[in-house]
Image (spheres, coloured by chain):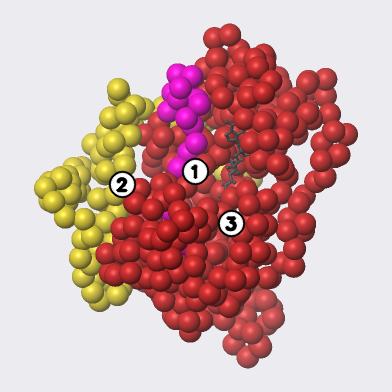
Chain colours: A red, B yellow
């Protein structure tokens, strides 16, 4: 159930594990195998067309022996009888079921939520329709500077649209990133003409039929469009109704084989919750890359193979304004919120040799446990190389690398791609120096 | 019932612990205090009772409370494989 990254990953892996298996995918949408992650960049005109976002043709699935049922909604699941109810088809039996029903945006829960002109970015067909609407939009409000919010803010500004950001937190991406990391992003937004309203809640969407303004705790903002980028929530409604166990995040409880609490039922992607590798707190609604990898594990096991997933350390990164931000595991804000003790080191370095054209500042912040100095998290802002550093630091946390390891790490120096001093190493050296003081 | 309680606890504790940490970070990095956007008795109880109590609990007790909640962390997850060790090499 589900034709997103998790569902399609699962279908392919199931066929690979057992080429004789009959695999059926049900999706509410018109398409599968497109990258929703690319949608903001088509809106921003960095990518010329939506067609580029399709990764496979519909025929490719027919050839691969996967029966994809488009625009087909599953309305209920019966795990005792091992069957699902499919709208327009009736009862469909299964030997193994994989739930990959994804996420929903949190309901803003204010009056006017049913007006036209409120855009929830997800389905590519709707995105194509909204893209035409964007041609006539002069002013847009982006509700919440979440990861998707960050991408949409920058995209709309690239499109020449006047953008207002309304967010209840004190800075952008405040549920994930630290304020010193986000400051350059917010400054670049100001230079791009984007207006931010932090510490501000949406109270209502106003208009007759279509939104014409957003009423907030800081006053009314006139607009032609509101893009709702509230945080993601697991879509596990059918699973809950079928009696499957959900965790404190509202996501499906799974084990390392992505098996749920019901025999023969697996789950993958944003509808599940996974334990964090550092403190085992379950977290839900991770990223597309997590969803795809989990789908492969679920699909393999459902078809009789054997594969395990592991607790997560969540490397993340994205372009925001004229910067790239990223990190892995905990930042200072999250560690403080959770009461996790840490020592910290910060370095302000550069992305290339200081004389090489295009050099950018890079800020790296490392958090480590006070006793053994093993890394527990990192955050960064800069230009090129943030993604690779985030991936590396995710593995560093996972494998128990210490500040001492990082302070003495070897690094690549080549003027166009890396500076003599690697900021990660300098941040670790600074952390150790501050401990000696 | 237990799942519903743990969801309620998670949503609220996450919200108010994060809000308190954000206020601390805003003071440290932005040099300003952040006024709370929701007022009233219930938010007040979370802010002035739950958050300080949570932070006063010893880390081990906090971790045990988290681990006692229902969720994926209670199912089986293998420990990560040990760091590489080549026989004959220390
Ligand atoms: C605009 C946008 C940008 C993104 N950018 C990034 C990025 O830069 N990097 C990254 O890693 N990830 C990104 N993501 C990925 C995203 O955040 C999720 O992690 C990912 O989409 C989760 O995949 P999924 O398969 O679990 O769920 P979804 O993608 O939510 O797919 C759910 C599927 O379930 C189907 N479904 C649900 N209920 C039913 C039902 N009852 N019957 C039949 N079918 C049903 C839907 O039709 C859909 O096919 C982005 C997503 C969006 C929308």
User: Image quadrant for the N terminus of chain A?
Assistant: top right
Residue at 49% in and 67% down: A224
Give the image quarter of residue A432: bottom left
**Dot 1 lies on which element?**
strand
Where in the figure is residue B85, as x and y percent of width and height? 61, 42
Figure check: A163 above or below B46:
below
Residue at 27% in and 64% down: A217
Residues in magenta?
A226-246
Callout in the foreground (3, 2) = 2
**Dot 3 lies on which element?**
helix
Write down the chain letter for disc 1.
Answer: A
- Evaluate whether label 2 is on the same chain as label 1: no
Write down the chain letter for disc 2.
Answer: B
Write down the chain letter for disc 3.
Answer: A
Where in the figure is residue A326, as x and y percent of width and height? 51, 63
Residue at 47% in and 47% down: A105
Measured Cα–Cα span from mark 2 to mark 1 = 19 Å
Residue at 30% in and 73% down: B29
Callout in the foreground (3, 1) = 1
A235 part of magenta stretch:
yes
Measured Cα–Cα span from mark 3 to mark 1 = 27 Å
Callout in the foreground (2, 1) = 1
**Dot 2 lies on which element?**
helix
Tell me, for residue B14, which label it has, or none.
2
Query: Mark 3 = which residue?
Result: A391
């Amino acid at each position: 159930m589900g034709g997103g990254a998790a569902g399609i990953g699962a279908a392919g892996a199931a066929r690979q594990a057992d080429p004789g298996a009959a695999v059926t995918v049900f999706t509410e949408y018109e398409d599968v195998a497109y990258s929703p992650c690319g949608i903001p960049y088509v809106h921003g005109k960095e990518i010329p067309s939506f067609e580029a976002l399709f990764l496979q043709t519909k025929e490719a699935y027919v050839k691969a022996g996967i029966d994809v049922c488009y625009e087909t909604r599953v309305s209920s699941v019966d795990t005792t009888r091992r069957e699902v109810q499919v709208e327009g088809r009736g009862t469909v039996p299964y030997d193994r079921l994989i739930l990959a029903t994804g996420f929903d945006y949190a309901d803003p829960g204010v009056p006017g939520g049913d007006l036209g002109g409120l855009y929830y970015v997800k389905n590519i067909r709707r995105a194509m329709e909204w893209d035409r609407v964007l041609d006539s939009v002069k002013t847009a409000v982006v509700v919440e500077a979440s990861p998707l919010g960050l991408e949409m803010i920058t995209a709309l500004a690239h499109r020449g649209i006047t953008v207002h950001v309304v967010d209840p937190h004190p800075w952008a991406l405040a549920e994930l990133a630290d304020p010193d990391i986000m400051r350059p992003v917010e400054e670049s937004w100001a230079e791009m003409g984007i207006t931010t309203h932090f510490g501000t809640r949406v109270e209502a969407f106003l208009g007759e039929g279509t939104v014409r303004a957003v009423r907030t705790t800081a006053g009314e903002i006139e607009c032609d469009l509101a893009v709702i980028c509230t945080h993601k929530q697991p879509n596990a409604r059918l699973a809950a109704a079928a009696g499957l166990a959900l965790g404190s995040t509202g996501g499906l409880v799974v084990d390392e084989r992505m098996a749920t609490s019901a025999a023969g039922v697996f789950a993958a992607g944003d509808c599940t919750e996974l334990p964090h590798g550092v403190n085992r707190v379950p977290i839900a609604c991770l990223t597309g890359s997590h969803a795809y990898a989990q789908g492969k594990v679920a699909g393999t096991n459902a078809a009789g193979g054997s594969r395990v997933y592991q607790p997560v350390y969540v490397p993340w990164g994205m372009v925001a304004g004229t910067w790239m931000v990223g990190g892995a595991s905990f930042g200072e804000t999250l560690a403080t919120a959770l009461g996790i003790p840490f020592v910290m080191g910060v370095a302000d370095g550069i992305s290339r040799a200081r004389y090489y054209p295009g050099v950018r500042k890079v800020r790296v912040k490392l958090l480590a446990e006070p006793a053994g100095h093993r890394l527990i998290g990192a955050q960064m802002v800069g230009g090129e190389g943030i993604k690779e550093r985030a991936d590396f630091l995710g593995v560093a946390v996972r494998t128990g690398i210490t500040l001492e390891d990082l302070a003495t790490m070897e690094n690549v120096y080549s003027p166009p791609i890396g500076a003599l001093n690697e900021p990660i190493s300098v941040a670790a050296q600074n952390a150790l120096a501050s401990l000696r003081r | 019932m237990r799942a519903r309680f743990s969801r309620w606890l998670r949503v609220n504790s996450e919200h108010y612990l994060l809000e308190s940490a954000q206020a601390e970070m805003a003071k440290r990095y932005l040099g300003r205090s952040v006024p709370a956007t929701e007022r009233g008795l219930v938010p007040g109880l979370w802010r002035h009772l739950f958050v300080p109590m949570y932070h006063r609990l010893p880390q081990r007790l906090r971790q045990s409370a988290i681990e006692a909640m229902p969720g994926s962390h209670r199912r089986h997850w293998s420990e990560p494989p040990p760091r590489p060790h080549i026989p004959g090499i220390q």
